[in-house]
Image (cartoon, helix red, strand yellow):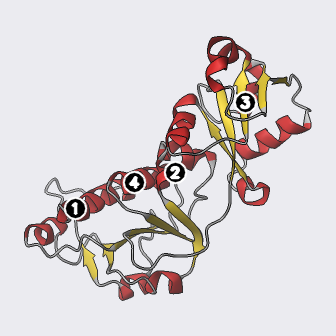
Amino acid sequence: MKPISSRDNPQFKVWRRLAQDSTAYRKAGQFWLEGDHLCRAALERGVRPLQVVLTESFQAEQGERWQGLTDQVFVVPDALFASLSGLESPARMGFVVTWQAVHEVLPDVSTVVLDRLQDAGNVGAILRCASAFGYRQVLAIKGTAALWSPKVLRSGMGAHFGLRLVESVSHADVVSLQVPLLTTSSHQGPFVHELLRRGELPALCAWVFGHEGQGVSESLMATARLSVRIAQPGGEESLNVATAAAICLYASASAAL
């Protein structure tokens, strides 16, 4: 194990940049995972860390459990680790994992398209739903929150490692998909539960979820095979996009059962 005790250490500066800059992973080719739950989720999916970073207290309690994953295991004082953490209650360990961009879009698999979603919590929650309901691919149109940022990774709770994630896709990439394109609307189209009841909701499809304020772009709305509504008998004007996504993805998954 290699001790690091100074915030001026070059290696520590790399971790801090990965932990605090939402797009640093793209240039560095590495991303930061924080917390034993998220790190275990990565390991369960076959991901192996490039580096393991443990606080002194965590190393004393569980250090042996995390040895053997890599020959780069670092130990830092708890207060120093807390200075790079993005959590209100800092975790006590983290991974640095190698990252490589995916560019190829698979045209014929169940897909989720994120159209300029900006809230990292929403993006992570949708990734988690996509993984839970059997979707294989997520396409992020330029303007969407960075998929491998620390905040999205935390919100995704390990979903990243079961999905094919493609960033900065174009409108052309989306319309080239060979599965039906579906969008949501608060005021037009059939209700999703009625489509499901009548057996008219495709199980294999691509759902598009749009910007929190502006919704799905007009060009994608015009391209979509279906624009559906979610019944809201309570009378609210609209749903949070992650909530709407959970309902729609579950409905399509149910159509496949």
Disc on the earlier residue, 4 or 3? 3
Label 2: how many residues lie within 10 Å, few (<14), some (14-19) or many (20+)? some
Task: Give the secondary structure at mark 3.
Answer: strand
Amino acid of disc 1: Ala
Label 1: how many residues lie within 10 Å, few (<14), some (14-19) or many (20+)? many
Pair 4/1: label in front = 4
Query: In the rendered image, which residue does mark 2 sit on?
Result: 161
Query: In the rendered image, which residue does mark 1 sit on?
Result: 251
Measured Cα–Cα span from mark 4 to mark 3: 27 Å
What residue is rendered at 65% in x and 24% in y? 92
Quarter of the figure with the N terminus: top right
Residue 49 drawn at (x, y percent): 67, 41
Query: In the rendered image, which residue does mark 4 sit on?
Result: 131
Measured Cα–Cα span from mark 1 to mark 3: 41 Å
Disc on the earlier residue, 3 or 2? 3
Label 4: how many residues lie within 10 Å, few (<14), some (14-19) or many (20+)? many
Measured Cα–Cα span from mark 2 to mark 4: 9 Å
Amino acid of disc 4: Ser
Label 3: how many residues lie within 10 Å, few (<14), some (14-19) or many (20+)? many
Task: Give the secondary structure at mark 4.
Answer: helix
Q: Is residue 173 above or below residue 141?
A: below
Question: Where residue 53 is drawn, which disc sits there?
Answer: 3
Question: Where residue 26 is drawn, which disc sits there?
Answer: none
Amino acid of disc 3: Val
Measured Cα–Cα span from mark 2 to mark 1: 23 Å
Measured Cα–Cα span from mark 4 to mark 1: 14 Å
Give yes or no for contact between labels 2 and 1 (Cβ–Cβ under 8 Å): no
Between residue 85 and residue 159, name the one nearer to us: 159
Residue 202 drawn at (x, y percent): 23, 74
